[in-house]
Amino acid sequence: MDTMRVKSIQFTITLSFVFITVTVMLIVSLVLYNKFSRTAEENAFLNTQQIIEQVQFNLENYIKGMSDTFEVVDAKIAKSQGVPSDKLLEQLDTIASTRQDIVSIDLFTAEGQLVTGIHTAQMRNNTRLTEQSWFKSALENPDHLTFSLPHIQNLFKDPYKWVVSMSKGVLIQRNGKWVDAVLLVDVNFKTLDDVFRTVSLGKKGYVYIIDDSAGNIVYHPQQQLIYIGLKYENVEQALKFSYGKYMDVRDGESRLNVVRTVNNIGWKIIGVSYLDEMITTRKEVSTFMIWLLVIVLIFILLISAFMSARISQPIKRLKKSMEMVEKGDFDTYIHVRGADEVEQLSRRFNLMVSRVRELMDQSIHEQEVKRKNELEVLQSQINPHFLYNTLNSVVRMVGSGKNEEVVKTITALSRFFRISLSKGKSIITIQEEIEHIRNYLIIQKMRYKDKFDYEIQVEEEALPYKTLKLILQPIVENALYHGIEYMVDVGMIHIWVGIVDEKIFLQIRDNGVGMSEETLSRILAGQTKSEKGSGVGLRNVNERIKLYFGVHYGVAVESELEEGTIVKIWIPLMLEEE
């Protein structure tokens, strides 16, 4: 008993073992991978945050040092008994010599006249001093130290230098009177530029600075590319943060942006780090997990293949014997030794083969009758949406007083149903089928107004011949609902019926949106069915024709997107119903 139980469940155990092992490993791997990924991201953010905070600290210290120097200069000017004076000039020169980054210290009147200062060259003409932003800020905000954006100093005849201007409105004694003046200290921006360029955020990461008023870029390691428009930074997003982080994507690469604000100056430091550089641990872990899964999976597959091979041998022998029966040899009796279940299966199969031989002829006959009945029922279906929409249109026309159109529509509808029913007959004349489709198009023309036109051409000699009823209406219905309804221009349906090569040839051509080869294949295979349609599609029309007239007749379709669709139908010449 134990032996039989082992034989019957071995294959199931093998499959279960493979499934459970792989599932557990996948779950554990995903958990570990997510844990390591989150840890790597957190460490990367903390590292970037610490670097940016150090940059912020150094910049604030530098700004404070410059502010203190400015205040010393301001204090010396305030204590001076008269400006200009040799003593004051000596003091300013001493202060300037203490810092190598000071480019100039100058004092101007409110009208822009140079009073005194420490500079190495004469002042330029036409500098438009009073129009410069640092000068106007000093006068508009007296007693407030203002830092300008980096700019080219153009006041003196020195080689142009990139500077940051510190300015402030002050009072000076001149000719015994206190008058308004502007104190300007220009600092060489190269000192700050050298500090920022030493910051490392991976091979591609960098730091840039903007002002928090308008998002103007104060510093960027690729400043020239910014100016000529070859590089862009999302400063609008950075302006939303005073202290925080956000992710963005630039040139297909994900970047972490850490924002810090410099106190008392209105600048924001943004550190940009690229995730593909920061999270190398994630790649290493994912590579390790993938290789581990592959090795374990191969090992499990080898074991399971060995176990299942021993179990499946009796089943394979049984399968080989059954293939003989599948090829039509119903006189074959099989007997396969193996597990008890396999032996029972072989005996049961022998009984089944005997019963199949008895029922085969009966089954084939019943299936053929059933198929014909199904197609007859399918043929007699009337689309409830079509009936509902037609009656709805009639109600609207009655409400609008369009009595002639009401009479025309109802007359066409009654003729449409009369031919659809045909006293239960499946075979009608070509003339009746044409009348049926003409009434259908009249009704649809009333509904769609100027949406489409139609043309019907029939050779006189084809009218008496017989055809299956309702083979045109499903195809015309498809042309309306799937081809013309989605058009902007007026659609056109052209129907031609005649005798070609001793056969009845019916062609339905529309100028609708058409369809792709893939869509057409699905329709002919019965994989696509419109909710608006009658249910009697191209495939069913084709099957009905082949069932009644043989495989040499049926439906062929040609379609091209944006060009339209052509449906061709071939049926035999038949004057009497067979």
Image (tube, grey):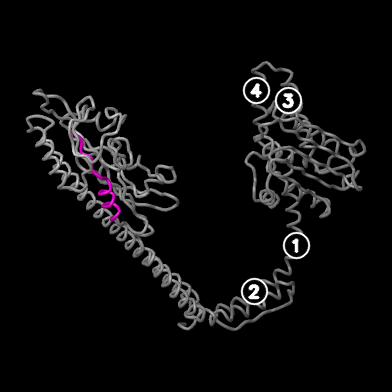
CA–CA distance in space, label 2 to label 3: 62 Å
Magenta part of the chain: 183-198
Q: Is residue 403 magenta?
A: no
Q: Amino acid at mark 3?
A: Ile
The residue labelled by disc 2 is 349
Q: Is residue 193 magenta?
A: yes
The residue at the point 42 percent across, 70 percent down is: 20
The label on residue 362 is 1
Instruction: Look at discs 2 and 3 and give the one toward the viewer.
Output: 3
- Image x and y of residue 347, in percent: 63, 77
Alpha-carbon neighbours of circle 4 within 10 Å: few (<14), some, or many (≥20)?
few
Alpha-carbon neighbours of circle 2 within 10 Å: few (<14), some, or many (≥20)?
some
Numbered disc 2: secondary structure: helix
Q: Is residue 92 visible?
A: yes
Q: Which quarter of the picture shows residue 292?
A: bottom left
Q: Amino acid at mark 1?
A: Gln
Numbered disc 1: secondary structure: helix
Decide which of tag 3 and tag 1 comes sooner along the chain.
Answer: 1
Decide which of tag 4 and tag 2 comes sooner along the chain.
Answer: 2
Instruction: Look at discs 2 and 1 and give the one toward the viewer.
Output: 2
CA–CA distance in space, label 4 to label 2: 64 Å
Alpha-carbon neighbours of circle 1 within 10 Å: few (<14), some, or many (≥20)?
few
